Amino acid sequence: MENISYESHRKRLIISADDFGVSSRANRNILFLISLGKIDRVEVMSNGIISPNEVDELSRSGVKIDIHLDILHEFENNRKKDIGAIIRMTGFLGKLFTGEILPSRVKQQWEDQIETFRQVFGRYPDGISSHEHVHFFPPFFKLAIELQAKYDIPYIRFGDSIEITHHNFIAYTLHLLKILNLRACRKFSCVSSSSLVSLDWIKNLDIFLDKLPEGTIEIACHPELAEDFVKIKKYF
């Protein structure tokens, strides 16, 4: 069957391109997809490699520009070594429980990243997300929503991954972490999508798009990767 654009579903989908700034290839691919109207939100790594021309083009595009918070570049360094997501998460948890990664230090890093974003773009971000969804972990979710309130940032990535039929271990983990964070989210009246899915979790996009859950669905993708780039260009 020939793939179609699924325009009837498109208004409920939020296509978010992660890792703007991680490489010139990522930036180039994301900006190209934006020019085609395929992207709704861009997740910017404020300490990444971003040229003034890319800042200008992104700012004029009309898409929402979010900050993609990072912790000590822990995940990025391991990603370059081609270490799987579960192993990366296990390693991160080990450093968290042994005190090698401290929330107090992370808070300062995240504030610095938000201020760097403001210096680069001339304003604060439209939303908050994080590399490898690390802000879902309760000590860091509390920090994220406090910073969201402090800087008047309207959106945070916090959709429920369990509602999606194409879930996996990471999706279940995020669902459990979301439950732990619900009280804090309600306290700060945080605004997010109803559901969250990573594009690489989806094995068959035709089936996925035919069985969408209710509400809005944020689809996180990485256009730096050829597979994600092709899927976004073809389906959305």
Image (cartoon, rainbow, N blue to C red):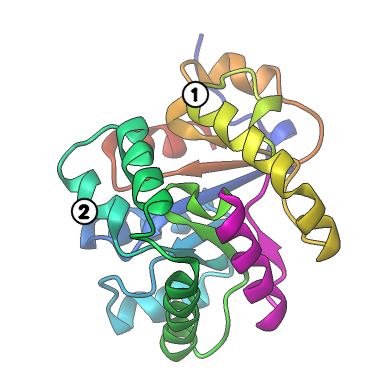
Q: Quadrant of the C terminus?
A: top right
- Look at the image and tell me whether residue 34 can be seen: yes
Q: Position of residue 36 (x, y in %)?
A: 47, 52
Query: Is residue 229 something one can see in this rendering?
Result: no
Residue 139 on the magenta span: yes
- The residue at the point 73 percent across, 43 percent down is 11
- Above or below, 182 against 50 in this view is above
Neighbour tally class for label 2: few under 14, some 14-19, many 20 plus, Cα within 10 Å: few
Residue with the mark numbered 1: 169
Secondary element at image label 1? helix
Tell me where the magenta segment starts and ends, as one range: 137-159
Tell me what residue is drawn at x 48 percent, y 51 percent.
134
Instruction: Answer with the quarter of the image where residue 62 lies.
Output: bottom right
Question: Which one is nearer the viewer's eye here, 123 or 2?
Answer: 123
Mark 1 packing: few (<14 Cα in 10 Å), some, or many (20+)? few
> Above or below — where is 87 with respect to 43?
above
* Residue 77 circle label: 2
What residue lies at 41% left-to-right and 86% top-to-bottom? 120
Q: Quadrant of residue 35?
A: bottom left
Q: Measuring from the top left, give residue 133's x and y in whole percent.
A: 50, 48
Q: Residue furthest top?
A: 1
Which circle marks residue 144 in the picture?
Answer: none
Residue at (74, 32) in percent of width and height: 8
- Could you tell me the amino acid type at mark 1? Phe
Residue 82 locus on image (x, y percent): 18, 37
**Residue 216 or residue 34, whichever sits in front:** 216
Which comes sooner in the sequence, label 2 or label 1?
A: 2
Question: Which amino acid, by three-letter code, is at mark 2?
Answer: Asn
Between 67 and 224, the one nearer to me in the picture: 67
Relative to 5, is 144 above or below? Answer: below
